[in-house]
Amino acid sequence: MNLGVLVSGRGSNLQAIIDAIEAGKLKDRIALVISDREGVQAIDRCVKHGIPHRVIKRRSFDSKEEFEKKLVEAMKGSGVDLVVLAGFMRVLSPIFLKEFPMKVINIHPSLIPAFQGMHAQRQALQYGARISGCTVHFVTEELDNGPVIAQACVPVLPEDTEESLSERILRHEHRILPQVIRWISEGRVRVEGRKVVVEGARYGTLPFNPELEDF
Ligand code: GAR
């Protein structure tokens, strides 16, 4: 597949995809990375690894509609098959989503439907959750709430800070995101209503991260 990755900042999930490709675990290529912010670490990663990238800023356009049309044009122009939101801090509207039906996935740092939106890890701490984690899901018009493809869970420890919990969750983000891309690339992912079926995925026993194969 030709991957299009949307980023806004650090780009550690982008790096996880790059690493999986470079290690031969993913057969896909990153056709284009688009950042909505200048000067972010995600762009440095693209430069370092020779990955095509562009900065497209919302404020360069009069409306969200025009901004998203530009994103679509750039993605289509690069022949993108699957769009990966990897720390992209904007909500996409149907203008973008209708052009890539069930072809946009997102990584979110909570077990959705818990703790959607911003600062998911802070929300989990403040709520007093004992377990949190991360989710890769298809992006629909509902914020952080499309059909779930994979989740991984981690304990929330009494001494946790937002940073320590984020770090523990992030390690699993870096595993489940490339894993899901591979499942999709291998044609093993089917959406049935709200549910996602992954052909041949191994499901072990709880507590942690039963479905992971290789990442
Ligand atoms: C990640 O923790 C990702 O799950 C989160 O932003 C971080 C980006 O880190 N995304 C969201 O909260 C989306 N709602 P990264 O830039 O290092 O990949």
Image: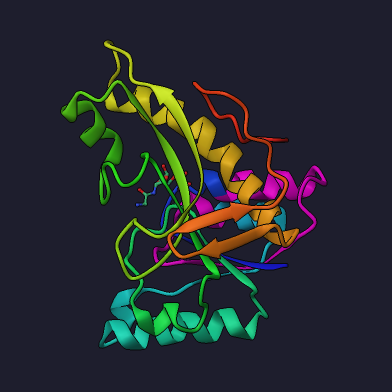
Count of labels shown?
Answer: 0
- Residue lying at the far left of the rendered structure: 126
Q: Residue at x 33, y 64 (%)?
A: 90
Q: Residue, x 65% and y 45% (percent of image)?
A: 179
Residue 71 x/y as whole percent: 47, 79
Q: Quadrant of the C terminus?
A: top right
Horizontally, residue 16 falls left or right of residue 182, namely left
The foreground one among 155 and 148 is 148
Here the colouring is rainbow
**Is residue 22 in the magenta section?**
yes
Q: Nearer the viewer, residue 118 or 209?
A: 209
**Picture residue at 75% right of the left edge, 50% below the top:** 21
For the N terminus, give its image quadrant: bottom right
Give the image location of residue 93, x and y in percent: 33, 76
Vertical position of residue 161 compared to residue 19: above or below: above
Task: Assess whether residue 26 is covered by the magenta stretch.
Answer: yes
The residue segment tinted magenta is: 14-43
Q: Position of residue 75 (x, y in %)?
A: 57, 78
User: Who is closer to the viewer here, 118 or 147?
Assistant: 147
